[in-house]
C-alpha cells in the first residue's frame, strides 16, 4: 500500500475523490489535525525570539516543540488509519454461505472493527492535546499570526467531528456491545471537549477582527 503521507497534495486529493477505500475520512481527519497543530506551530515560530514576547519565550519554546511533536503524531495516524481499514475492507468480502463461514467471518470482522475504531479514537486523544496549545498560542503568540491560531482551531474542531464519525461507524457493527458502547461514549466525550475548546478559541479570534 502506498505511503499516503508521502503523496503530493494533488495525488492525495485525487485518491480521496476516487472509489479507492483509502484515503478516507479517518485518515483525512488525522491530516486535518496535523495541519491544525502545524498552524499552532507557525504562531509559535513567529513569536519566539521577539523582544515583545520575551516574557513568554520559555513557555513558547516548549509549546512550539509540543505542537511539532503532535503534528508528527497525527501525520503518522494518516497511514495507520489506512493500514487498519484495509483488512476490514477485505473482511466484508469473506464468504458467509455456511454457518462455519459466518462464524469465521464474524470473528475476523470483530477484530478488524476493533482495530479500525482504535485509530480515529487515537486521533481524538491526540487532538485533545492540540487545542490547549492553540489556546496558549492565541493568547500569547504574535498578534500578526492570531488568525492562524483561529484557523488551527477551526481545523481541529472539524478533525474531531470527523474522527468521531469514524469511531462510531465501526463501533456500530461490533458484536461486543459493552466495548462498543464504552468506546463510543469516550469518543463522544473527547469530541465534545475538543470542539468546545476549539469553538471558544475560534470565537475569541473572530471577535478580534469584527
Image (tube, rainbow, N blue to C red):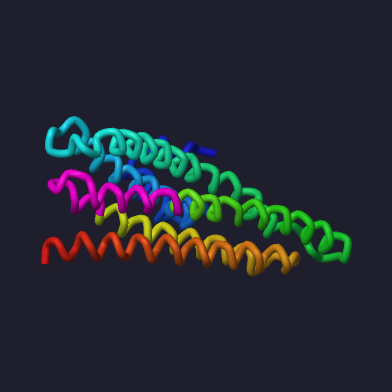
Q: In the rendered image, which quarter contains the N terminus?
A: top right
Q: How many marks?
A: 0
Residue 13 vs residue 112: left or right? Answer: left
| Residue 4 falls in image quadrant | top left
**Residue name at image x 68 percent, y 59 percent:** 92
In the image, the segment drawn in magenta is 128-149
**Residue name at image x 75 percent, y 54 percent:** 108
Answer yes or no: is residue 12 visible.
yes
**Residue name at image x 23 percent, y 62 percent:** 204
Magenta highlight: main SS:
helix
Q: Is 178 one of the magenta-colored residues?
A: no
Which percent across, then down, holds residue 191?
47, 63
Which percent across, then down, holds residue 135?
31, 53
Q: Residue furthest top?
A: 49
Decide which of 97, 42 is in the foreground and name it: 42
Seen in the picture, residue 95 relative to 62 is either above or below; the reply is below
Which percent across, then down, holds residue 120?
53, 54
Answer yes or no: is residue 14 visible.
no
Q: Residue furthest front?
A: 55
Decide which of 174, 140 is in the foreground and name it: 140
| Residue 91 falls in image quadrant | bottom right
Seen in the picture, residue 93 relative to 62 is either above or below; the reply is below
Which percent across, then down, holds residue 41?
30, 40
Q: Is 144 one of the magenta-colored residues?
A: yes
Amino acid at each position: 500500500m502506498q505511503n499516503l503521507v508521502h503523496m503530493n497534495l494533488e495525488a492525495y486529493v485525487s485518491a480521496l475523490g476516487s472509489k479507492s477505500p483509502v484515503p478516507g475520512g479517518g485518515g483525512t481527519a488525522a491530516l486535518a489535525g496535523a495541519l491544525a497543530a502545524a498552524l499552532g506551530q507557525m504562531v509559535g515560530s513567529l513569536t519566539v525570539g521577539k523582544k515583545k514576547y520575551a516574557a513568554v519565550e520559555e513557555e513558547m519554546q516548549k509549546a512550539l516543540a509540543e505542537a511539532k511533536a503532535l503534528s508528527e503524531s497525527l501525520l503518522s495516524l494518516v497511514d495507520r488509519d489506512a493500514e487498519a481499514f484495509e483488512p476490514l475492507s477485505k473482511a466484508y468480502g469473506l464468504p458467509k454461505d455456511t454457518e462455519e463461514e459466518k462464524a469465521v467471518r464474524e470473528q475476523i470482522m470483530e477484530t478488524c472493527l476493533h482495530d479500525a475504531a482504535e485509530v480515529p479514537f487515537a486521533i481524538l486523544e491526540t487532538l485533545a492535546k492540540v487545542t490547549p496549545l492553540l489556546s496558549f498560542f492565541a493568547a500569547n503568540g504574535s498578534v500578526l499570526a492570531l488568525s492562524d491560531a483561529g484557523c488551527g482551531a477551526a481545523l481541529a474542531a472539524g478533525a474531531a467531528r470527523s474522527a468521531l464519525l469514524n469511531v462510531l461507524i465501526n463501533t456500530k457493527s461490533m458484536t461486543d456491545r459493552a466495548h462498543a458502547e464504552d468506546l463510543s461514549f469516550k469518543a463522544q466525550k473527547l469530541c465534545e471537549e475538543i470542539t468546545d475548546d476549539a469553538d471558544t478559541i475560534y470565537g475569541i479570534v473572530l471577535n478580534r477582527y469584527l
